[in-house]
Amino acid sequence: MNAFDPAGPRLDAAALDARLRAAAPTEIIAAALDAFPGRVAAVSSFGTESAVLLHLIAQVDRATPVLFLDTGHLFPETLAYRDALADRLGLTGIVTFQPEARELAARDPESALWADDPDACCALRKVEPLARALAPYGAWINGRKRYQAATRTDIPVVEADGARVKFNPLAAMARPDLEGYMAAHDLPKHPLEAFGFASVGCMPCTTRVMPGEDPRAGRWRGRAKTECGIHIAEGI
């Protein structure tokens, strides 16, 4: 697949968002695939809530590319969950991306950048590999929801994302909606959820969540950081 041409025809993300605001998640996913035939990919962390989006994608098109970032710091349970869930849902388009080995050697030779500069670590291990992974695509689908954190309360269903368009088909879903969907379709949970991990990222920067905390409170706990950067970086 050739690289996406950012100077090519543009889609009016705001107009499409207005049309899809009340649409069902499968309708939003189908609209993304129709608007960008062969040029849309989903991005999944295979975290605690990922099964819902992936199951919905499988209902629309099991061959949809699903990009997964293996940062090198992930829990082994996450890697096992990726494989089990992909097999369970019959997803055939999963592609795993990793940081460039030369960049790791130059910028994080001791694999300790997460402790000294978590923003730089996320840039190296998440933002830059995702930019490379998304290079051929004009749009991407992700699993963010408005309820997850204060930084996400106003996310639209469709939004401009630099040169691309980003689809958020689960934006309006609340935690009870997700739990009900998981139960109704007998979807397996991430193994670490049983141990109090409501949101699972990289091992060094993920802790358990206490009762009453928002689901992402365990990410970068004690640091002035709430996002890894892939949803705020321009032009990826």
Image (cartoon, rainbow, N blue to C red):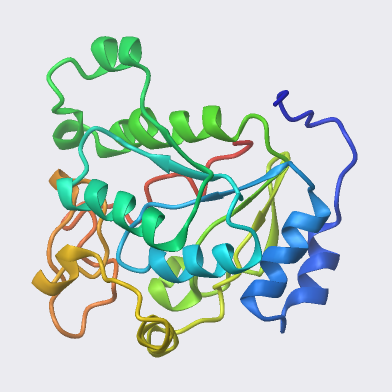
Q: Residue at x 38, y 84 (%)?
A: 175
Residue 227 relative to residue 23: left or right:
left
Looking at the rendering, in which quadrant would you find the C terminus? Answer: top right
x, y (%) of residue 71?
30, 35
Residue in view at x 85 percent, y 30 percent: 7
Instruction: From this view, report whether residue 95 is shown above or below residue 202.
Output: above
Residue 201, given in percent of the width and then of the height, sits at 26, 52
> Where residue 19 sits: x, y (%)?
82, 75
Nearest the viewer among 63 and 23 is: 63
Q: How many marks?
A: 0
Q: Is residue 130 above or below residue 173?
A: above
Residue 73 versus residue 161 in the image, above or below = above
Identify the residue shown where x is 55% and y is 70%: 56
Determine if residue 178 is in view.
Answer: yes
Q: Is residue 144 visible?
A: no
Instruction: Report the quarter where the N terminus lies.
Output: top right
Residue 29, picture quadrant:
bottom right
Q: Position of residue 106 (x, y in %)?
A: 27, 10
Pick the front one: 224 or 108: 108
Closest to the observer: 99 or 194? 194
